[in-house]
Image: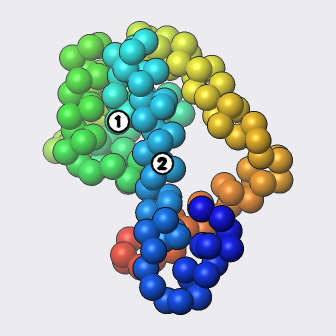
Amino acid sequence: MSQSAALSDETTGALKLDAYLPYRLSVASNAVSGLIARAYEDRFGLSIPQWRLICVLAEDGGKTQREIVARTVMDKVTVSRAARELVARRLAARSSNKADGRSHVLTLTREGERMHAEISPLALAYEAALIAGLAPAEVAQLKRLLIRLQGAAGALSGAES
């Protein structure tokens, strides 16, 4: 759709799906996630939620499932299922939380760390290919705008983001 078509839809006040920003964001996210998910699944047997957990644990160290939910904005059931699967594959380990006996802390095992180190270059290569047609300033602006949109969505929902 052309930029002028999108602008004309916005000026009429009528909802046009292709010009509706939440729809565009969702479609773009699904396309990117689907592309990358196929690579993770085919080569490493990981789902998107499992890969996100591995990344969070590699970046932040041990986390409770509640902390992972907050960090990834995934729902509790998805995080719980991904955590169980990573523990079963011995990519993550669960230990008691000394600060709160009712929860557990997840950490990566050596195998999980190895897998993260193996997949990270692939993920970065996909990112580079996706943004190859954008100038560095456009990439920086896109990231800033996405952070602002996430913050606005959090404020509208009453949640912190």
First of labels 2, 1 by sequence position = 2
- On the picture, is 110 further left or further right than 120? left
Q: Quadrant of residue 122?
A: top right
Of residues 105 and 9, the one nearer the viewer is 9
- The image position of residue 48, as x and y in percent, is 38, 33
Label 1 element class:
helix
- On the picture, is 130 further left or further right than 31? right
Q: Residue at x 23, y 24 (%)?
A: 85
Q: Which residue is mark 1?
A: 49
Image vertical order of residue 21 relative to residue 110, above or below: below
Q: Residues within 10 Å of mark 1 (few under 14, many from 20)?
A: some
Q: Residue at x 74, y 50 (%)?
A: 139
Q: Residue at x 49, y 65 (%)?
A: 18
Of residues 5 and 57, the one nearer the viewer is 5
- The image position of residue 28, as x and y in percent, is 51, 50
Q: Which residue is mark 2?
A: 29
